[in-house]
Amino acid sequence: MSQWLPNRRRFLIWAGSVAGACIVLAVAAAVILLFVPQFWHAQAEARQVTIARGMNLAQIARLLKEEGIVTDSRVFLLATKLLRAEARLKAGRYRLSPRLSHFRIVDLLRKGRVTAEWVSIPEGAESWTVASILARTLEVDSAAFIALTRDTSLLRELAVDASSLEGYLYPSTYQFYWGAAPEVVIRTMVREFWRQMGDSVQAGAQAMGMTLHQVVTLASIIEGEVMLDAERPLISAVYHNRLRLRMPLQADPTIQYLVPGRGRRLLKRDLAVDSPYNTYLYPGLPPGPVNNPGMASIVAALHPAPVDYLYLVARGDGGHVFSRTLREHLRAKERFDQVRRQVQAAQRQR
């Protein structure tokens, strides 16, 4: 009995040492798995991963495993629980490296460190087109975006004296974060508009006896018509001449702004739509812009070519035929209609 006690004591000491070593190894393994970058991962290049709105923790873990960002989804779940971030991971588009530690990945998702995206808004895009681009590229709420473009308090705050922000969402290439708030995007675009409208533009409008709003409205019509840059001053001249003579502008872009099915050929019944934007029925400029013009069209609106053209008609190749008299215009229109009939006949024969 006396010999057994020392042996038992030695066994307990040995067992305790083994258990302690196991705990140390377990803690070391946990530290490596959770805190140490996954340097053993074969893939080092960062990749884009989108955490969709409404995804639960298990779905996020599975997605990261499928995308090769984490080697073991269970370790990711453990890291999430240790950081108490189970319900705090944010949706968004992230650029993640497979060699980040699990803790670092959880931390990025918890803080919503989404990637910045470059978004190009083309010249002449209408507000609904801008909203569609933002929804597709950034998942911005398009309905909320459109509602804000008509928000009177926001319009006042942004110093836009109009009924909507149509014309004031400056077309350019911007960098926004995925899922950006619609108001953030709008403020950025309108701030860029005012940056572009320097003293020279506003002085130019005043010299022509026009408000800036009228200049932007005319520029939007020019933008809607033009396909060849060289024609901008000529198109501007046509409309300036018509305004001076108090002739209806008869500008197709203002009708296209009214009718559904944007981009289709206008019909006679479209020209009868009763709206102050219908420049076939109502003389003068419409109440506001019909798209968001770029600087080239704004400059053209301020500097029309010194010509006395009153009419323009498409030529069929992107350009226009300009005329001084109605007779010249009707002849040019007949030539274009003939070309169009020939093209349609050739298409039917295919």
Image: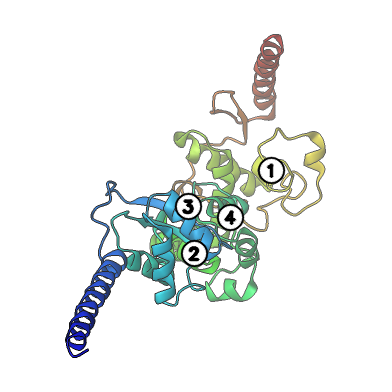
Q: Which mark lies nearer to you, 2 or 4?
A: 2
Q: Amino acid at mark 1?
A: Gln
- Which residue is disc 4 drawn over? 131
Image height of 279 relative to 347, above or below: below
Q: Residue at x 78, y 40 (%)?
A: 270
Q: Are marks 2 and 3 in contact (CB under 8 Å)?
A: no
The residue labelled by disc 2 is: 180
Residue at image position (61%, 31%) is 324
Q: Which one is earlier in the sequence, the residue at label 1 or at label 3? A: 3
Q: How is the image coloured?
A: rainbow
Q: CA distance from mark 2 to mark 4?
A: 12 Å
* Crowding near the residue tagged with mark 1, few <14, some 14–19, many ≥20 C-alpha atoms within 10 Å: many
**Are discs 4 and 1 less than 8 Å apart at CB?**
no
Q: Are marks 2 and 1 in contact (CB under 8 Å)?
A: no
Give coordinates of residue 268: x percent, y percent: 80, 35
The amino acid sitting under disc 4 is Ala
Q: Which residue is mark 3?
A: 171
Residue 205: percent from the left, percent from the top? 49, 59
Horizontal side of 280 relative to 193 (left or right) equals: right
Which-is-in-front pick, marks 2 and 1?
A: 2
Dot placed on the residue nearer the N-terminal end, 4 or 1: 4
- Amino acid type, callout 3: Pro
The amino acid beneath tag 2 is Ala
Q: Is residue 79 left or right of residue 269?
A: left
| Tag 1 secondary structure | helix
Nearest to the eye among marks 2 and 3: give it: 2
Measured in 3D between alpha carbons, the distance from the residue under mark 2 to the one under mark 3, in whole angstroms, is 18 Å
Crowd class of label 2 (few under 14; some 14 to 19; many from 20; radius 10 Å): some
